């Protein structure tokens, strides 16, 4: 399965060359392993390019899938291979409704556990609130995104978004439980007197 990460190497023309790491998302130690003498972290980053001469916006939109990748690294070879590490946060719930809203959160390798635990706890609590019917999914996602941005300096993005800025996601209405699984009556089963 792996712990997938993408690694973007900044070029002199301010575009990026993009590479893949199958285990680079497990911990953020890859940030310390990429150096001028080991630019591919001794094989932890694959040599073949996923994309060449690409903008950061296109990396987020076309390559960094938030429900697949766990980490993202920006490498500056011109700056002695300085590396910025990011945790990738999926701002959706895995219930088959689609939606690929994500955020990258700047994270120091020493603090990665804090960000991961904070995000999972916040998202899990919101998921429970959605399931109880207390908050619509769209409102919960907006709240989660706001928390990630305000508390963790996250950068939100939409994977798979069209170039015109319109989302390819078609939202579906929230349902607490299917009508057949509810203990209380639904509107369809209640007869009203006129």
Image: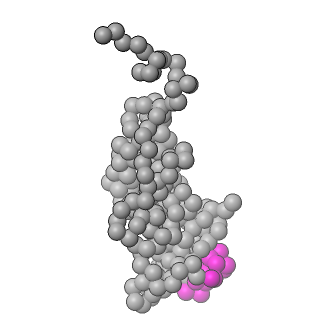
Question: Quadrant location of residue 44?
Answer: bottom right
Residue 191 in the magenta stretch? The answer is no
Question: Quadrant location of residue 149?
Answer: bottom left
Image position of 122 with respect to 86: above or below: above
Q: Residue at x 47, y 45 (%)?
A: 123
Q: Name the spot of residue 138 as percent of width and height, x first.
A: 38, 45
Left/right placement of residue 14 relative to residue 29 reads left
Q: Residue at x 55, y 24 (%)?
A: 180
Q: What is the magenta segment's predominant secondary structure? A: loop
Image position of 41 with respect to 119: above or below: below
Image position of 51 with respect to 112: above or below: below
Left/right placement of residue 23 relative to residue 32 reads right
Q: Name the spot of residue 105 as percent of width and height, x first.
A: 43, 61
- The one nearer the camera, 169 or 135, is 169
Q: Name the spot of residue 83 as percent of width and height, x first.
A: 48, 75
- The one nearer the camera, 161 or 104, is 161
Q: Residue at x 58, y 71 (%)?
A: 30
Q: Name the spot of residue 100 as percent of width and height, x first.
A: 47, 57
Quadrant holding the C terminus? top left
- The one nearer the camera, 8 or 168, is 168
Quadrant holding the N terminus? bottom right
- The one nearer the camera, 84 or 8, is 8
Question: Quadrant location of residue 130?
Answer: top left
Q: Which residues are magenta?
A: 36-48
Residue 55 visible within the image: yes
């Amino acid at each position: 399965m792996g712990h997938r990460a993408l690694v973007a190497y900044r070029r002199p023309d301010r575009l990026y060359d993009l590479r893949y790491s199958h285990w680079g998302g497990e911990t953020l130690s890859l940030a310390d392993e990429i150096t001028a003498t080991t630019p591919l972290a001794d094989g932890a980053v694959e040599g073949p390019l996923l994309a060449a001469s690409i903008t950061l916006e296109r990396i987020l939109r076309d390559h960094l899938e938030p429900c697949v990748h766990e980490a993202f690294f920006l490498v500056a070879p011109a700056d002695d291979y300085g590396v910025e590490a990011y945790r990738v946060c999926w701002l959706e719930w895995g219930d088959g409704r689609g939606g690929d809203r994500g955020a990258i959160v700047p994270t120091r390798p020493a603090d990665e556990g804090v960000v991961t635990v904070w995000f999972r706890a916040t998202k899990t609590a919101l998921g429970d609130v959605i399931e109880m019917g207390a908050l619509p999914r769209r409102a919960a996602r907006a709240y989660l995104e706001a928390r990630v941005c305000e508390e963790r300096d996250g950068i939100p993005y939409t994977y798979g978004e069209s170039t015109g800025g319109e989302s390819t996601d078609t939202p579906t209405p929230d349902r607490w439980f299917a009508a057949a699984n509810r203990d209380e009556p639904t509107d369809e089963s209640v007869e009203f007197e006129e």
